[in-house]
């Protein structure tokens, strides 16, 4: 009887290890570190708009939701001091828009690699001018050494891909002339 | 009997944790998409594509009336760049479980329109059917 229970536990445990279940990414883990070099501070308030995201679901595993990317983007911009203020103010001078492209996610495996594909655009309302327009695709990988549980590994891979995307965004913002 | 039970539990566990009955087809477009300005497209090769997905996408865009170029050739004059991301799973045989096709601005890589389909094992489609569904939905964004 004990052998049977042990076998069942092994089977269920193995399934949990290799399957990508559902845990949403966290803002803190997606916040990008500031790349080397100077990022100019834009002279005004920015508001961040995100579309195209999908909430994490139990069936399909971790996914990037609009609210999650918005929070991580705002945290990154604040941390990098890229704008004077970050707010939801409708009258903000700058609008940073992100369009998330839905990309296939890993379904099963020991190593999960997520891709995050986002179209970024920065509009200066005062000048009615698009200052930045760029599609950025980045990937993140998590292995068994990062986490034993499949759901955690999936989330970590997604967070790494989103973090890399925001780091690339900061590099692009550093090239903008305000 | 015990072996049968074990197989049942394995199958049940994998079904429960990997989502076996998902059918989805969607597409979206950026307001800046100007379909009438896109006559030529360049299909970029995706590293690791060893199942011919790029060729299926090339054939679909050709059949849809576009002038098509593709990697490894370069075409800096193309009106748009097409990228794709296919995901495959094994269930008795290999099948394409997910496909995303994205139309981008050539220089900025900005995504102008994107189509995506998911069909899991029990309702799987052939790679050609997947490409047809995704690209058809993508091109509907022009109407």
Image (spheres, coloured by chain):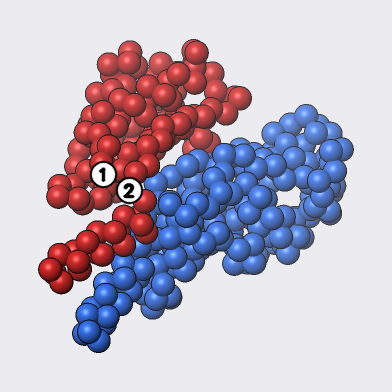
Chain colours: A blue, B red
Between B20 and A158, which is closer to the camera in this rendering?
Answer: B20
Q: Position of residue A135 (x, y in %)?
A: 53, 41
Residue A120, image x and y in percent?
A: 61, 42
Q: How crowded is mark 1: few (under 14 residues within 10 Å), some or many (20 or more)?
A: many
Disc marking residue A160: none
Residue B53 at x, y percent in the picture: 25, 37
Where disc 1 sits, the SS reads: helix
Pick out the residue farthest to the bottom. Answer: A2
Residue at image mark 1: B121
Q: Which of B119 and A34 is in front in this view?
A: B119
Total label count? 2
In the rendering, which numbered label is found on residue B20?
2
In the rendered view of the protein, which quadrant contains the N terminus of chain B? bottom left
Q: Mark 2 lies on which chain?
A: B
- Classify B27 as above or below A41: above
Q: Residue at x 87, y 38 (%)?
A: A91
Q: Position of residue B61 (x, y in %)?
A: 32, 21
Q: Do the residues labelled 1 and 2 touch (CB within 8 Å)?
A: yes
**Residue at 20% from the left image edge and 50% from the top image edge:** B91
Query: Is B51 displayed left or right of A17 in the figure?
Result: left
Vertical comparison of B46 with A157: above or below: above
Q: Earlier in the sequence, mark 1 or mark 2?
A: 2
């Amino acid at each position: 009887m004990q052998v049977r229970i042990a076998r069942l536990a092994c089977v269920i445990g193995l399934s949990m290890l290799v399957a990508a279940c559902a845990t949403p990414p966290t803002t803190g883990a997606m916040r990008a570190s500031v790349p080397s070099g100077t990022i100019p501070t834009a002279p005004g308030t920015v508001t961040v708009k995100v579309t195209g995201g999908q909430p994490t679901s139990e069936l399909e595993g971790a996914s990037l939701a609009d609210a999650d990317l918005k929070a991580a983007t705002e945290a990154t911009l604040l941390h990098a001091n890229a704008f004077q203020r970050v707010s939801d103010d409708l009258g903000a001078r700058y609008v940073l828009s992100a369009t998330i492209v839905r990309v296939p996610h890993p379904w099963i495996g020991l190593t999960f690699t997520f891709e995050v594909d986002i179209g970024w655009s920065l509009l200066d309302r005062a000048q009615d001018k698009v200052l930045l327009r760029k599609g950025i695709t980045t990937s993140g990988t998590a292995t068994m050494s990062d986490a034993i549980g499949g759901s955690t590994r999936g989330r970590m891979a997604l967070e790494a891909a989103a973090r890399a995307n925001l780091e690339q965004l900061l590099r692009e913002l550093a090239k903008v002339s305000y | 009997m015990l072996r049968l039970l074990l197989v049942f539990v394995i199958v049940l566990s994998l079904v429960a944790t990997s989502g076996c009955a998902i059918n989805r087809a969607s597409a979206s477009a950026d307001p800046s998409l100007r379909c009438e300005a896109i006559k030529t497209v360049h299909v970029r090769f995706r590293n690791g594509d060893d199942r011919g997905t790029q060729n299926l996408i090339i054939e679909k865009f050709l059949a849809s009336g576009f002038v098509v170029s593709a990697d490894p050739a370069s075409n800096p004059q193309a009106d748009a760049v097409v990228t794709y991301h296919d995901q495959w799973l094994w269930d008795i045989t290999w099948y394409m479980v997910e496909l995303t096709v994205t139309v981008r601005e050539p220089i900025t890589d900005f995504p102008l329109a994107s189509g995506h389909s998911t069909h899991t094992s029990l309702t799987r489609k052939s790679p050609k059917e997947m490409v047809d569904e995704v690209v058809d939905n993508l091109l509907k964004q022009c109407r």
